[in-house]
Image (tube, rainbow, N blue to C red):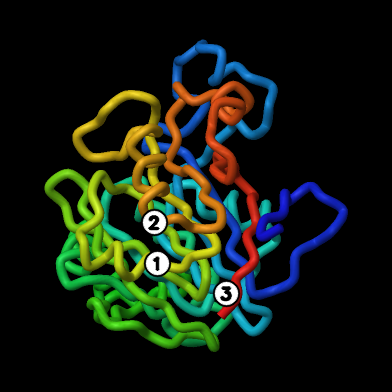
Amino acid sequence: MSNSDSSTAHPISPPYLVVLGCGTSTGVPMIGCKCPVCTSSDPRNHRTRTGVAVVTGTGNLLIDTPPELRLQLVREQIDSAEAVLYTHSHADHVLGLDDLRIFGYRRKASLPLYCEPEVQGHLRRMFAYAFDQEKETLHSRPMIHFENLGNDPLELLGLTIQPIPLIHGETRVLGFRIGNVAFCTDCNAIPAGSEQLLQGLEVLILDALHEHSHPTHFSISEAIEVIGRLRPGEAYLTHLSHQVDYAKTSARLPEGIHLAHDGLKIAISP
């Protein structure tokens, strides 16, 4: 099996990917909602905002910095990060950026943020204090710097990471393929060239908001159709809303397709 529940007695060895959060932008439970999923006692129905970490044994990579990043990293006992990769700059994927402060202090060096130029511009505006070179008060801002990210693969911590261009409504976003695993959140279309980059996967993690069509996210049925074309060994659906009950929806999914949950761990092979 390529996955491991974080509560199992058989810990997974690095390198692996851990789902820090698999919820949509409101999180689950959603504020003020008393629906069956939001009031569920099943921990797999409690979803923080979407992001993942890649644990290598020699260092850790983060993909996105969701609003609950501190809580997610404490929960997974991840106490260091060597780089961050950004899929895009929507609030639910970046608002945890300030939680990166602790890593710069411990490293005594700035943390590289890999993203496309448009995302860099958005982050500079959203977190202007973090890039104010005239303010050097200790602990006042994260120590970070940008590295340009395009379509070419990059090498980090001994892993080859292939950016995957995706379409999220009218927004270009990036997924990432790391060895035999790909993480493709926040999308409702995959260009033909990107589908080629997603061939031969053992595990695909794919956006699937809920059962109904949406202008910027795959529905569950649309995601299943994409998975049928790409034919990974296994697939996990992420960025899930409060309309998705873990047990009830899982029972209806085709073989080899699962719902992600916070804390899910997936082994990575080169």
Name which residue lies at 20% across and 53% down: 167
- As helix, strand or loop, the secondary structure at mark 3 comes to strand
**Residue shown at the point (69%, 22%) measured from the top left:** 41
* Residue in the foreground of this view, choosing between 159 and 114: 159
Q: Name the residue nearer the viewer: 78 or 172.
A: 172
Circle 1 packing at 10 Å, graded few (<14), some (14-19), many (20+), is: some
Name the amino acid type tagged 3.
Answer: Asn
Q: Are marks 1 and 2 in contact (CB under 8 Å)?
A: yes
Q: Position of residue 165 (x, y in %)?
A: 24, 64
Q: From the viewer's perspective, is 176 left or right of 148?
A: right
Q: On the image, numbered disc 3 is attached to which residue?
A: 60
Spatial CA distance of label 1 from label 2 is 6 Å
Earlier-in-chain disc, 2 versus 3: 3
Element type where label 1 sits in the image: loop
* Quadrant containing the N terminus in the rendered view: bottom right
Residue matched to label 2: 230
The amino acid at mark 2 is Leu
x then y, percent, for residue 218: 31, 39
Q: Give the mark nearest the N terminus, 3 or 1.
A: 3
Q: Nearer the viewer, mark 3 or mark 1?
A: 1
Residue 21 drawn at (x, y percent):
52, 47
**Residue wearing tag 1:** 199
Circle 2 SS class: helix
Q: CA distance from mark 2 to mark 3?
A: 28 Å
Q: Residue furthest left?
A: 170
Measure the alpha-carbon separation of dots 3 and 1.
25 Å
Above or below for 241 versus 100: above
The residue lying toward the viewer, choosing from 8 and 61, is 8
